[in-house]
Image (cartoon, rainbow, N blue to C red):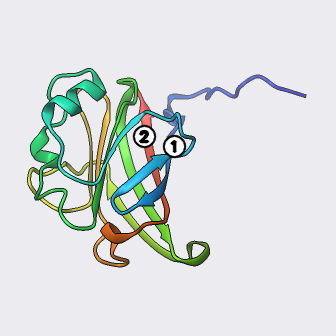
Amino acid sequence: MSQPGLFPYTSREGKAVRCTKLLYKITAAKTGSPMPIDDARALFIFDATTQAIIDAHLGTSSEFTAAQFDSTAMGADAFAAIVDMGKQVDELIYVVAKCYSGTEGTTQVHRTALGDSTLTDSTLDTECEIGSSGNVGIRVDFGNSPDFDALTAGQIEIDIYWRAK
């Protein structure tokens, strides 16, 4: 039997924290595809990208800059996701990125970034940021365990915890 949604009676309850999950299958070195295949929310990259590509994906102008995803920032063993959140993110809580590889995903590497971090230009680090238009940029440095750039099979899972406007 279905029931109506539960709405808080007090403002102390606050807005609910939401989780957006992105899933990718690693199909070759520095190549992946979203699961399900038609999930086009995120521009998912392993190498440097351009301002035109970022702006075209989000439909905004310089919400995230190419310098945040340049060749230094996207160095060895890094990937990024520029996520079209429909311009509805008010607060970015944190991001968890996981890579599963090896037999039955037994090799696991996890990275997290708090939502109050920023995407530093030309810096290879794990960071996330809410853009000026309410979309999300994520950059992850998985380090060299395993050699992330050389993986030809595995899965990447990204959990974005956020609150709506």
Residue 158, image x, y percentages: 45, 52
In this view of the protein, which residue sits in the foreground, 11 or 54?
54
Q: Answer whether labels 1 and 2 touch (C-beta < 8 Å).
A: yes
Residue 133, image x, y percentages: 26, 25
In this view of the protein, which residue sits in the foreground, 118 or 6?
118
Q: Where does the C terminus fall, quadrant-wise?
A: top left
Q: Residue furthest front?
A: 28
The type of residue carrying mark 2 is Trp
Residue 92, image x, y percentages: 35, 42
User: In the rendered image of this protein, does residue 163 appear above or below residue 79?
Assistant: above
- Left or right of residue 91: residue 118: left
Residue 19: mark: 1
Residue 162: mark: 2
Q: Quadrant of residue 35?
A: top right
User: In the rendered image of this protein, does residue 54 appear above or below residue 158?
Assistant: above
Q: Quadrant of residue 112?
A: bottom left
State how far apart marks 1 and 2 are (Cα): 6 Å
Residue at 53% in and 34% down: 38
Residue at 21% in and 62% down: 125
Mark 2 secondary-structure assignment: strand
Mark 1 secondary-structure assignment: strand
Q: Where does the N terminus fall, quadrant-wise?
A: top right
User: In the rendered image of this protein, does residue 160 appear above or below residue 16?
Assistant: below
Residue at 37% in and 54% down: 31
- Packing grade of label 1 (10 A; few <14, some 14-19, many >=20) is some
Q: How many marks?
A: 2
Mark with earlier residue (1, 2): 1
The type of residue carrying mark 1 is Cys
Residue 140, image x, y percentages: 30, 59
